[in-house]
Amino acid sequence: MIRLRSFLYAVGLVLFTPLYTLVILLSFPFAPQTRYRVIRPWSKIMLAWLRLTCGLSYRVIGAENIPATPSIVLSKHQSAWETLAFQSIFPPQVWVLKRELLRLPFFGWALAQSSPIAIDRGTARLALKQLLDQGKQRLADGFWVVIFPEGTRIKPGQKGKYKVGGAWLATHTGALVVPVAHNAGEFWGRNAFLKHPGTITVSIGPPLDPAGKKADDLTAQVEAWIEGEMPRLRSL
């Protein structure tokens, strides 16, 4: 049944996404916030389809920690699921991602309309400058910035190296940092076809003020909170 339900989800995704991409591309002439309002329903529909076909839903703890002003989300990255769900959990947002993703048919074309910060990872110094320049602008435009500090999807129970880019952006803009832990990888693994039924738990930590902190120290704080929260999520 898990294979069948996962297949049904994939069929819906493959059939619906190209059609909705056409709608998103037609929003090109509008302002970024307007384009985001056009894009966001796609993720909500896909989450509803995931719940219907695969029996996979989610819950959020710590929602009261979400600040009222545009902030920087530094999150655990285990699955493709969080790229869908964060659009429903957090206010309008942009993601920091690899430039190559924008070349993917349909998904990448639609992603380009969401005003992402598409980093060229060839040169670290230029990537940091791009992150700061575009991150400042996105925050000023009212967007939140979502960054996965480990840089790639990590299997449950494992930990990658936390990079300082997100904290560096925070220390240079004064934006609050919101650490996020979740256990999506236990239900929808990295590049996995199978989606297992259950309830994903997302835990949002207290916002961290970057004032007076170095990027390395702020990154260490984020890492300590996320990695300390992960074992608790597995026990819930």
Image: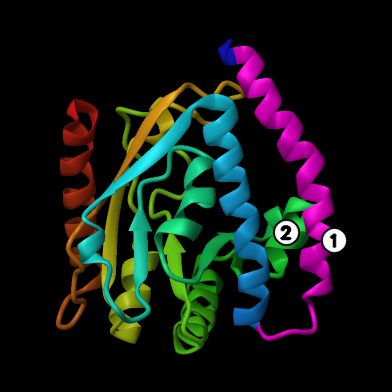
Disc 1 secondary structure class: helix
Residue 72 placement (x, y as % from top left) = 36, 70
Majority secondary structure of the magenta segment? Answer: helix
Quadrant of the rendering where the C terminus is positioned: top left
* Residue at 50 percent of width and 59 percent of height: 87
Q: Pointer 2: what residue?
A: 102
* Residue placed furthest toward the top: 1
- First in sequence, mark 1 or 2: give its number: 1
Which residue is drawn at the image coordinates 71% and 66% (left, top)? 112
Is 107 on the left or on the right of 160, as rendered?
Answer: right
Q: Nearer the viewer, residue 65 or 185?
A: 65
Vertical placement of 44 versus 160: above or below? below
Can you tell which mark lies on residue 199?
none
Image quadrant where one finds the N terminus = top right
Q: How many marks?
A: 2
Q: Position of residue 142 (x, y in %)?
A: 46, 84
Which residue is more in the foreground, 32 or 197? 197
Q: CA distance from mark 1 to mark 2?
A: 15 Å
Q: Position of residue 22 (x, y in %)?
A: 85, 61
Identified by mark 1, the residue type is Leu
Please check the rendered image and state whether residue 172 is part of the magenta-colored stretch, yes or no.
Answer: no
Q: How is the image coloured?
A: rainbow
Q: Residues within 10 Å of mark 1 (few under 14, many from 20)?
A: few
Region of the chain picked out in magenta, as a range? 3-31
Above or below: residue 217 compared with residue 2: below
Residue under the point 38% across and 40% down: 58
Nearest to viewer (mark 1 / mark 2): 1
Would residue 155 be seen by someone viewing this image from the given angle? no
Task: Examine the image and state in which quarter residue 34 appears.
Answer: bottom right
Q: Which residue is mark 1?
A: 22
Mark 1 and mark 2 in contact? Answer it, CB < 8 Å: no
